[in-house]
Image (spheres, helix red, strand yellow):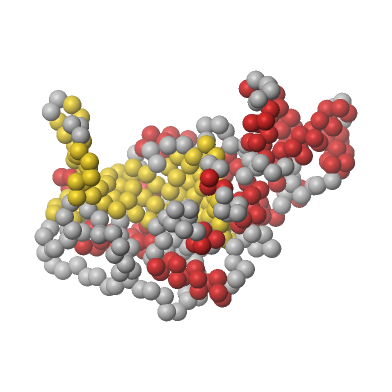
């Protein structure tokens, strides 16, 4: 449902306490801002998942300053020690309680209600999708790499290098990430999509893969990283802007965001790429049936266009090739043919993995490990002492 969250809390709502915690470290200072961090020493490996804490002082003109604490964390890792298991609405209080404990441990006392009503600077709604029927997450990632992502996104080739295990389209304001959740654990921190693996998460996956070697989990994650983009997306979905932590910790909010990105960016004009029909003559017959007034040469053109778009590299690579010989307007004429290829697509013409993803996004049930493996690393129990 929800993974990474970044909260901004005014400094006036934060009280520092003396409990032997690590002091603030100055990271940067300019005439207009100061940046401090308050994180555990590097190399610490006690099994406890902790948020990243940053203190900011900014000048806003006329001698005025704003000061706030920025808290970044993975909500499921905070609650469960891993982000394979997914949260539900009922878990909100537990997450706030655990975050409160970690902040006190760091020497920061913030009222729990202030945490719940904190401003959201970024959040990553997501879904772990279990694939069945012989489909693999890597296969689905390779198929999705063929889609036509609007040029406002930069489809990073570097993130599609792990044997087809990940795909990312991004801008500074938002991104869509699709990857093989299980295979990502085998990657080094530099190459992995999830760069903050906990000891419990690593052990959990190792146990599960040993007991269920055929387990395939596709991770679909939307990363909204700028406040302006968050507000634009929420308004477009009929949801209130400027959300608090409590307001985005909702199944329906996360579900609407993930579904909207999937439908607009992935399915949108790309459904024909996911068809099971591979015989070009059968495709030609279907096109002629759907468009009885179409000239034969135009129908043949569509069959060729379909083959080129389904080839390795997909629509994006085809566009790069053609734009060397034609104007951008010429490419838009090509998209008219792509729109015709999408017409008449029914579920029976589509691969089963697409239907599985649609069903998972429609239900949006939190994934849980049915029988948690034994002997997993546990987090030390930490109890708040009275102040």
Toward which corner of the image does residue 346 lie, by quadrant? top right
In the image, residue 354 lies at what x, y percent? 66, 51
Q: Residue at left 55%, top 31%?
A: 151
Q: How many marks?
A: 0
Question: Going by the image, does 92 lie left or right of 170?
Answer: left
Residue 100 % position (x, y): 25, 59
In percent of width and height, residue 295 lies at: 87, 26
Viewer-side residue, 222 vs 29: 29
Q: Position of residue 55 (x, y in %)?
A: 22, 46
Judging depth in this view, the residue of 237 and 58 nearest the camera is 58
Check the image and report above or below for 131 versus 53: below
Residue displayed at 58% across by 37% down = 149
Q: Is residue 29 left or right of residue 143?
A: left
Quadrant of the frame with the C terminus: bottom left
Q: Nearer the viewer, residue 108 or 197?
A: 197
Asked if one can make out residue 260 in the rendered structure from this viewpoint, the answer is: no
Q: In this orientation, does residue 83 appear?
A: yes
Q: Quadrant of residue 300?
A: top right
**Is 105 drawn above or below residue 179 in the view shown?**
below
Q: Residue at x 22, y 53 (%)?
A: 38
Q: Answer with the quarter of the image where residue 342 lies.
A: top right
- Residue found 30% across the figure and 44% down from its top: 119
* 185 is higher (above) or lower (below) than 25: below
């Amino acid at each position: 449902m929800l993974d990474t969250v970044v909260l901004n809390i005014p400094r006036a709502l934060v009280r520092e306490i003396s409990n032997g915690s690590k002091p603030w470290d100055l990271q940067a200072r300019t005439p207009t801002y100061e940046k401090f961090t308050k994180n555990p020493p590097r190399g610490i490996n006690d099994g406890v998942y902790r948020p990243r804490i940053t203190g900011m002082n900014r000048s806003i003109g006329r001698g005025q300053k704003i000061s706030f604490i920025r808290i970044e964390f993975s909500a499921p890792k905070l609650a469960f020690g891993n982000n394979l298991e997914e949260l539900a609405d009922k878990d909100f209080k537990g997450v706030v309680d655990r975050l409160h404990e970690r902040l006190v441990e760091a020497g920061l006392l913030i009222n729990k209600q202030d945490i719940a009503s904190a401003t959201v600077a970024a959040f990553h709604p997501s879904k772990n999708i279990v694939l069945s029927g012989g489909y693999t997450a890597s296969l689905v990632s390779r198929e999705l790499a063929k889609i036509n992502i609007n040029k406002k996104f930069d489809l990073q080739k570097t993130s599609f290098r792990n044997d087809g295990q990940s795909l990312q389209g991004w801008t500074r304001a938002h991104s869509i990430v699709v990857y093989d959740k299980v295979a990502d654990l085998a990657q080094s921190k530099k190459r992995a999509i999830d760069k903050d693996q906990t000891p419990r998460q690593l052990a959990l996956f190792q146990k599960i893969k040993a007991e269920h070697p055929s387990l395939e989990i596709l991770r679909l994650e939307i990363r909204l990283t700028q406040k302006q983009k968050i507000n634009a997306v929420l308004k477009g979905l009929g949801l209130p802007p400027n959300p608090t932590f409590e307001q985005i910790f909702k199944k329906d909010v996360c579900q609407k965001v993930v579904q909207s990105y999937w439908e607009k960016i992935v399915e949108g004009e790309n459904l024909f790429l996911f068809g099971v029909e591979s015989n070009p003559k059968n495709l030609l017959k279907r096109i002629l049936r759907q468009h009885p007034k179409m000239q034969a040469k135009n129908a043949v053109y569509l069959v060729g266009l379909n083959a080129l778009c389904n080839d390795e590299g997909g629509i994006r690579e085809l566009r790069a090739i053609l734009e060397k010989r034609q104007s951008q307007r010429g490419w838009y004429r090509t998209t008219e043919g792509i729109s015709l290829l999408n017409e008449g697509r029914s579920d029976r013409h589509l691969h089963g993995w697409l239907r599985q993803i649609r069903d998972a996004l429609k239900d949006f049930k939190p994934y849980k490990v049915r029988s948690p493996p034994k002997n997993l690393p546990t987090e030390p129990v930490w109890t708040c002492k009275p102040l």
